[in-house]
Amino acid sequence: MKTAQVSTGSPATGPDILPVRTIEILELLAIALRDFRASYVYGLSISGIYTVGGWVRVLLLVYFELPYLVYPLAAGFALIAPFIAIAFYAVSRSIERGETLSWRGILNSVRTAARGDLGWMALVTGFSLFIWMDIAALLFFGFIGLKPFDIQELLRVIFTTPMGLLFLMIGNGVGAILAFAVFSFSVISFPMLFDRDVDFVTAMITSVKVVLTNRKAMTVWCITIAILIGLSLLSGLIGLLVILPILGHASWHLYRRAIPNRPVDG
């Protein structure tokens, strides 16, 4: 059955954008799980690197007596997740093409994509994380103060005092707004830059158009990402070993679903 066309692409307006139904999010997750099962060695290896990297960052923050930045850093992981998922895009594309998976093939695909505007897009999301960390620190100093805390005292102040609870509420609210903004311009742009020879501004605009065209489905996808990453944080980052590959594969297939390989006939 032919899929309904939402917009017709042209060199001036960008690629076609197809509708994505909310129910298709579950289908995309099922396809992502299939990709993960077909490539679990690569998925666990890649996500393992990021998991260990997360532990190292947390330990460094605690060592330098900056425990108040642990949660913002962990929550801010969602801002750079699309960039981290590039290797999973390579895996899903290889499976899609029926190619034999290999580390050389994955690395070559990532290296080739990095020669384009992918680096600029990574810089944008990295800067967003930097801004979020600054905002979180300013909110902490404003509501809690400059007094150094150990982890136990920090948790007590945040969860049992009025100012701590207010900081938590406002901080999460500001973080959610920033996260959705970054999600809007990055959810499609990263797989698009990996897959096509386009500039990062075009990719960002296309990503926002996809989100605006499919508000319900993309909102559900954003919430799904937040919940799954939240569960990973609660597991001490162990959950990232499985959740990160699945989110990466699903993001690739969402891009494929929303952006056709060629213009849609009228």
Image: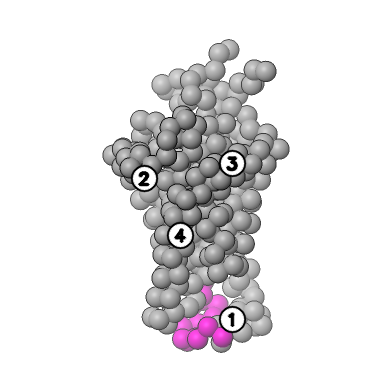
- Compared with 79, 154 (above or below) is below
* Mark before the other along the chain sequence, 3 or 4: 3
Point out the frontmost of discs 4 and 1. Answer: 4
Q: Which amino acid does label 1 sit on?
A: Leu
| C-alpha distance separating marks 4 and 2 | 15 Å
Q: What residue type is labelled 2?
A: Trp
Q: Nearer the viewer, residue 212 or 34?
A: 34
Disc ID at residue 48: 4
- State the separation of the CA atoms marked 3 and 4: 19 Å
List the residue tagged with mark 1. Answer: 155
User: Judging from the image, what secondary structure is the residue with disc 3 in?
Assistant: helix
Of the numbered discs in the image, which one, if any, rests on residue 103?
2
Marks 2 and 1 sit apart, C-alpha to C-alpha, by 42 Å
User: Counting other residues with Cα less than 10 Å from the Cα at mark 3, is it few (<14), some (14-19), or many (20 or more)?
Assistant: some
Q: Are marks 1 and 3 in contact (CB under 8 Å)?
A: no
How far apart are labels 1 and 3 at the CA level? 39 Å
Marks 2 and 3, the one that precedes in the sequence? 3
Q: What kind of residue is marked 3?
A: Arg
Q: Which of marks 2 and 1 is nearer the N terminus?
A: 2
Boundaries of the magenta span: 139-152
Residue contact between numbered discs 2 and 3, judged by CB atoms under 8 Å: no
Does the magenta segment cover residue 156? Answer: no
Q: Position of residue 11 (x, y in %)?
A: 41, 21
Q: Which numbered disc, 2 or 1, marks the residue closer to the eye?
A: 2
Amino acid bearing label 4: Gly
- The residue that mark 3 highlights is 34
Does the rendering let one see residue 80?
A: no
Instruction: Identify the residue at image location x=55%, y=77%.
Output: 143
